[in-house]
């Protein structure tokens, strides 16, 4: 089964495509001010445009602090519409909303806004598609189309913040409080743009969305050099690593990047990040029936993480089209949780919001559904007893 599971190549270098039109959110404040000056306007107009952008105002007619004669020109030059909503699907009484966006070149991405009693979280995409080839993930099975620009990533969060502020989500007007990079793509394979996005998310209004760093979560498959770079840059956003297996043998097939950076490398890099921030990182683990949910693996994971600043977030697998893999049954989930906790590892089970609109983790595969391309069939899980687990991952 290993051959079939690693059939897709790992792709780090995104295909080069025509760049999206220039947008204020791709520029530094100085660059934006220079661009406005070039258009014959005073530099402070850049700040006015930024204020409108981060509030989700796109209609020039509403930009009443700009002279009517220059509104169209300035918005055309610096706030081009980069994300066109194709459709929105709702679930959970409207409190979960998935939006499919079309980009300037026709590429499609999705974002999901989830409102809870105490917070509102948007799950955003950092790439159109993904090159990481994880066999259980719908996005990963469709390959990488291209990197998103910073403005295209930031725009998804801005749209969510505006939807909350405008009271479009049941529960009255509210505030976007959290952003997670758990949509399409591998954020750390698009480092520079994601780095710029992080700045925009945490910069106070009017030049950003003013979120706290800890309420922004970067989720990575384990691009170790990029985790180290994030550490060196002194950021303290929340880090999530998608482990999915405690042993290299299984992880090589579930998370193909493991053939390059091993379990021990990933947790070492995450430890260094946690040491730097003083906060726990999150370990994502999709529970797949008879694949990675055995009690032995729970113990191995528990021993691996026992003395680390880690928190395990178990995600019952969201089955993807064509896959014969399934979520672990409840008793197996409970046993897995109990064993991790017995090792002293803080553990939670992720709720599976948005499942019925294919908006849950790993289900985002916009291009596939729109173009009607048949999904890749995934291998059947092995029914053999779990392999003998060595001590290698205990390091
Ligand atoms: N590339 C990033 C973001 C991926 S999506 C990363 O790998 O972390 C966020 C999480 O959903 C990841 O942990 C990913 O492995 C997980 N995921 C992907 N497909 C899934 C599925 N079908 N069911 C449950 N979780 C899934």
Image (cartoon, grey):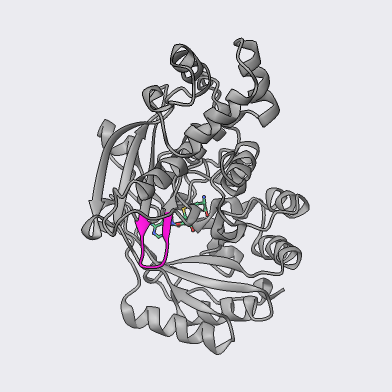
The mark tally for this picture is 0
Residue 119 lies, in percent from the top left, at 42, 63
Q: Which residues are magenta?
A: 114-121
Quadrant assignment, res 57: top left
Horizontal side of residue 67 vs 233, given as left or right: left
Asked if residue 372 can be seen in this view, the reply is: yes
Q: Would residue 34 be counted in the magenta stretch?
A: no
What residue is drawn where x is 70% and y is 27%? Answer: 30
Residue 2 vertical position relative to residue 184 in the rendered view, above or below: below
Q: Residue furthest right?
A: 232
Q: Would residue 117 be counted in the magenta stretch?
A: yes
Residue 374 vertical position relative to residue 310 in the rendered view, above or below: above
Residue 139 vertical position relative to residue 82 in the rendered view, above or below: below
Residue 328 lies, in percent from the top left, at 35, 72
Q: Residue furthest left?
A: 93
Q: Nearer the viewer, residue 332 or 312?
A: 312
Residue 232 lies, in percent from the top left, at 78, 52
Residue 243 lies, in percent from the top left, at 55, 63
Q: Nearer the viewer, residue 286 or 30?
A: 30
Asked if residue 148 can be seen in this view, the reply is: no
Q: Nearer the viewer, residue 225 or 208?
A: 208
Q: Quadrant of the C terminus?
A: bottom right
């Amino acid at each position: 089964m290993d051959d079939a599971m690693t059939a897709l190549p790992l792709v780090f270098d995104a295909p080069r495509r025509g760049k999206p039109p220039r947008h204020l959110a791709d520029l530094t404040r100085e660059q934006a001010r220079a661009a406005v000056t070039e258009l014959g306007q005073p530099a402070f107009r850049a700040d006015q445009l930024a204020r409108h952008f981060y509030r989700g105002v796109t209609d020039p007619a509403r930009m009443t602090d700009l002279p009517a004669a220059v509104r169209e020109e300035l918005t055309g030059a610096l706030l081009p519409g980069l994300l066109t909503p194709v459709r929105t699907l709702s679930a959970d009484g409207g409190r979960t909303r998935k939006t499919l966006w079309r980009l300037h070149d026709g590429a499609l991405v999705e974002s999901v806004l989830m409102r809870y009693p105490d917070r509102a979280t948007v799950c955003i995409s950092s790439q159109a598609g993904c090159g990481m080839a994880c066999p259980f993930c719908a996005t990963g099975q469709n390959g990488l189309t291209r990197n998103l620009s910073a403005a295209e990533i930031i725009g998804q969060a801005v749209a969510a913040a505006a939807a909350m502020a405008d009271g479009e989500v049941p529960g009255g007007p509210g505030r976007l409080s959290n952003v997670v990079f758990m949509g399409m793509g591998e954020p750390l394979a698009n480092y520079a743009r994601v780095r710029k996005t992080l700045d925009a998310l945490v910069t106070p209004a009017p030049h950003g969305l003013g979120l706290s760093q800890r309420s922004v979560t970067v989720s990575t498959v384990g691009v170790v050099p990029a985790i180290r770079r994030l550490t060196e840059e002194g950021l303290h956003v929340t880090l999530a690593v998608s482990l999915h297996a405690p042993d290299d043998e299984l992880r090589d097939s579930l998370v193909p990047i493991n053939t390059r950076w091993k379990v021990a490398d990933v947790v070492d890099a995450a430890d260094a990040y946690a040491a730097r921030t003083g906060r726990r990182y999150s370990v994502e683990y999709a529970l797949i029936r008879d694949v990675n949910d055995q009690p032995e693996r729970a113990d191995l994971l528990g021993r691996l993480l026992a003395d680390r600043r880690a928190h395990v977030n178990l995600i019952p697998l969201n089955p993807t089209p064509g896959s014969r893999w399934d979520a672990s049954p409840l008793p197996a989930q409970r046993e897995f949780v109990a064993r991790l906790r017995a090792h002293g590892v803080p553990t939670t089970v992720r709720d599976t919001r948005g499942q019925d609109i294919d908006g849950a983790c790993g289900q985002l595969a916009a291009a596939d559904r729109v173009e009607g391309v048949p999904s890749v069939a995934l291998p059947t899980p092995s029914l053999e007893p779990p392999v003998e687990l060595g001590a290698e991952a205990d390091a």
